[in-house]
Image: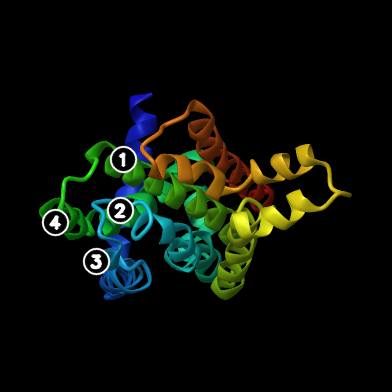
Amino acid sequence: MRDTWQHTWTIAKRELVGYFASPVAYVFIVIYLLLNGFFTFMLGYFFERGEASLAAPFFFWHPWLYLFLVPAAGMRLWSEERRLGTLELLLTMPITPWQAIIGKFIASWLFLILALALTFPVVLTVSYLGDPDMGAILTGYFGSVLLAGAYLAITSMTSAMTRNQVISFILSVVVCFFLILCGWEPVTRPLANADWIPEWLVRTVASFSVMTHFVSMQRGVIDSRDLIYFLSAIGFPLFCTGVILRGLRA
């Protein structure tokens, strides 16, 4: 077990160092922080709301913000290895495919968590201006971390499917966009009002959406069903990534 985690962490460190070996990581973080600030203070009307809360002005935009930024950060995970011809070399090393998958995923996830952690001035601002519910803010950040992990796992899967990073990016955006729309209230409300669509079907489809499970965390509620959903949304694409890589190895 110790050797397993040592190999996994070695892959993770290699991948994480690779992010910061080029200016791309710093450009990504700057763009992420700028967009986060724009969505929060301009589109979210942070000051106009007059309430000490980050649910609507800050966390509400994360599913849409991650829709493009997370696939951009993760599209190179396996596509780059396939394009450079180093995938075969990586898979012939004395490590299992799962160690490589988890190691790469952890490195990219830590990179996204670092970018999210750098938004702490928003928390300081709302704390200075009012008396916010810090429990709701912490659960909102926790939900945002899980949301980024779900998007990243999907991107890992699409990246393993092709050696073209642009195709990987487009496929992951489409899949993540579907996971938003199937539970987004402006979409589900007309469907629920339609007489020819059973209500249970609408609820079932909406339960597959990240919005349905992320909204409750914005409000400070951590439900076991939401945790199971996000862990499944992370685990299943990573499992599919392993299947794809085993097929390439064969």
Q: Which residue is drawn at 24% across and 66% down?
A: 47
Q: What residue type is labelled 4?
A: Leu
The residues tagged by marks 1 and 3 sit, at their Cα atoms, a distance apart of: 19 Å
Q: Could you tell me if the residues under marks 4 and 1 are in contact, i.e. CB atoms within 8 Å? A: no
- Picture quadrant where residue 69 is located: bottom left
Q: Are the two marked residues, 2 and 1, in contact with CB atoms closer than 8 angstroms? A: yes
Determine the secondary structure under disc 1.
helix
Kind of element beneath mark 3: helix
Which residue is pictured at 28% across the width and 67% down the height? 48
| Spatial CA span between label 2 and label 1 | 9 Å
Tell me the kind of residue under disc 3: Phe
User: In the picture, which quadrant includes the N terminus?
Assistant: top left
Along the polypeptide, which appears first: circle 2 or circle 4?
2
Which of marks 3 and 1 precedes in the sequence? 3
Nearest-to-viewer mark from 4 and 1 = 4
- Label 1 belongs to which residue? 136
Residue drawn at (59%, 62%) of the image: 172
Which secondary structure lies at badge 2? Answer: loop
Q: Around disc 3, counting alpha carbons within 10 Å, would you say few (fewer than 14), some (14 to 19), or many (20 or more)?
A: some
Mark 4–mark 1 Cα distance, whole angstroms, equals: 17 Å
User: Which residue position holds label 4?
Assistant: 129
Q: Which label number is shown at residue 54?
A: 2
| Residue 207 in the image, given as x and y percentages of width and height | 64, 41
